[in-house]
Image (cartoon, helix red, strand yellow):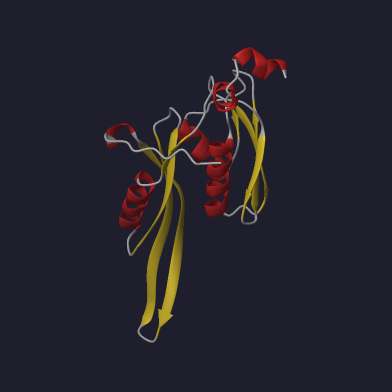
Amino acid sequence: MAINRVKINSESELKDRLVAINRVTKVTKGGRTFTFAAIVVVGDGNGIIGWGLGKAGEVTSAIAKGVEAAKKNLVKVSVLKGTIPHEIEKSFGGATVFLKPAAPGTGMVAGGAMRAVLESVGITDVLAKSKGSSNPHNLVKATISALCEVRDAYTVAGERGISMQKVFRG
């Protein structure tokens, strides 16, 4: 299945969220050198999401690089009335995520890196579970990959070339 890449001209509507910062230490004969790696998620709250990884000697520079990388990596996700159209399970590396639609008013039942991704994309009601590794990098990639594979009924009807009534009738 093709990923729906998106180009956006006005970056002012994109909001960035910091998911995790990792401090890396390199030991040389001159001493220790500290660098930082930041994973950042950007989204408009209306179905567009992107993630990026920035590495630099300072935290602010790493975050800025992560935001720039995330803006180059935007995808369009199907969001239907604040939730996802159907449940899905997806893995990336050792992390597995399970997303299930929820009724309006349920709220977001998700933790850590998954919560940042789901809030940035504009999902308000969802039940989510992460299994396996809790590595933020793999959780972000697995969550975005799962969201990219979700299709709504309009898309399914268009791909099959049939009416909406036939999609729901079976």
Give percent across and percent down for residue 123: 52, 28
Residue 74 lies in quadrant? top left
The quarter in which the N terminus is drawn is: top right
The residue lying toward the viewer, choosing from 21 and 53, is 53
Out of 170 and 83, give the one closest to the viewer: 170
- The residue depicted at 38 percent of the width and 66 percent of the height is 35
The residue at the point 40 percent across, 46 percent down is 73
| In this view, 149 is above or below 70 | above
Q: Quadrant of residue 46?
A: top left
Pinpoint residue 42: horizontal percent, then vertical percent.
Answer: 40, 40
In the picture provided, is 76 more to the left or to the right than 9?
right
Q: State the residue lying farthest toward the right.
A: 170
Above or below, comparing residue 81 to residue 95 in the picture: above
The front one of 77 and 163 is 163
Which image quarter: residue 86?
top right
Residue at the spot 46% in from the left edge and 60% down from the top edge: 22
Q: Residue furthest front?
A: 161
Q: Position of residue 47 (x, y in %)?
A: 46, 30
Percent across and percent down for residue 104 are 60, 18
The residue shown at (35%, 52%) is 63
The answer to whether residue 9 is left or right of residue 96 is left
